[in-house]
Image (cartoon, rainbow, N blue to C red):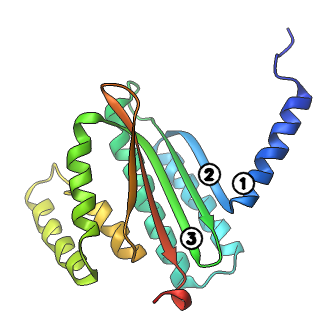
Amino acid sequence: MTSSYSTEKSITFVHKLHKDLKSKRIMLAFEGGFTQNLTKNILFLAENRLTQTGEHISVKKKVFNVMMECLQNISKHAGSTKPVEGTHDGIFIIGKDETGYFLISGNFIKNTEITELERKINEVNSLDREGLRSLYLTKIQETELSENSTAGLGLIDIARKSGNKLKYDFFKIDDKKSFYTLTTYVIKPELAE
């Protein structure tokens, strides 16, 4: 049986994809089912890529921590729309430009979850560094009282560690689910205000 996707098309596609990733400065991209084990492997690969860049340890630490929160959010929260337990479709991208690192995550969520998630992100984005610290401490206390909720701690932590506002969007798929994207940016300290 012959594949309809020829070797020549495959080679052309891979070459174009490689060029596109380099031109967009993508260091690592993964799309598919996310599990806890896969998340650990992605973190390991990304840590190696960051080490290869020769980046300062403080920047690597910030990027790694933000990346860990983004991956945990995909792994934890995308499950509500996936029929097979333990895997969650999503995407994670990390790239680098002249001023720092951009991290993009995306996953499916229920449409009924959008309003609350948007409220949490807007609350986080409305706060300065001290406000984020205060909200973080409040949410930690709430979480200790209620073991069922993380109270948006991941979003607060991403904003605290990146030092930047969170950018997000929702793309409606159907009446039940949407695709949610979250973008954050870690600026190199010497270029930060």
Q: Specify whether 21 is left or right of 14.
A: left
Q: Residue at x 24, y 74 (%)?
A: 127
**Which disc, if any, is residue 21?**
1
Residue 152 is situated, as x and y percent measured from the top left of the image, at: 24, 58
What element does badge 3 sit on?
strand
Which residue is nearer to you in this view: 172 or 182?
172
Amino acid type for the residue under numbered disc 3: Tyr
- The residue labelled by disc 3 is 101
Residue 4 is situated, as x and y percent measured from the top left of the image, at: 82, 16
- Of all residues shown, which one is farthest toward the right? 8
Answer above or below: position of 149 versus 83: below
Q: Specify whether 33 is left or right of 16.
A: left
> In 3D space, how far apart are the residues under numbered discs 3 and 2 (Cα atoms)?
13 Å
The answer to whether any part of residue 152 appears in the image is no
- Of all residues shown, which one is farthest toward the left? 145
Amino acid type for the residue under numbered disc 1: Leu
Mark 2 touches mark 1? (CB < 8 Å): yes
Residue 16 is situated, as x and y percent measured from the top left of the image, at: 81, 45
Which residue is nearer to you in this view: 42 or 101?
101
Mark 3 touches mark 2? (CB < 8 Å): no
- Of all residues shown, which one is farthest toward the top? 1
**Which disc, if any, is residue 29?**
2
How packed is label 1: few (under 14 Cα within 10 Å), some, or many (20 or more)? some
Closer mark to the observer between disc 2 and disc 1: 1
How packed is label 2: few (under 14 Cα within 10 Å), some, or many (20 or more)? some
> In 3D space, how far apart are the residues under numbered discs 2 and 1 (Cα atoms)?
9 Å
Q: Specify whether 109 is left or right of 96.
A: left
Answer above or below: position of 17 versus 32: below
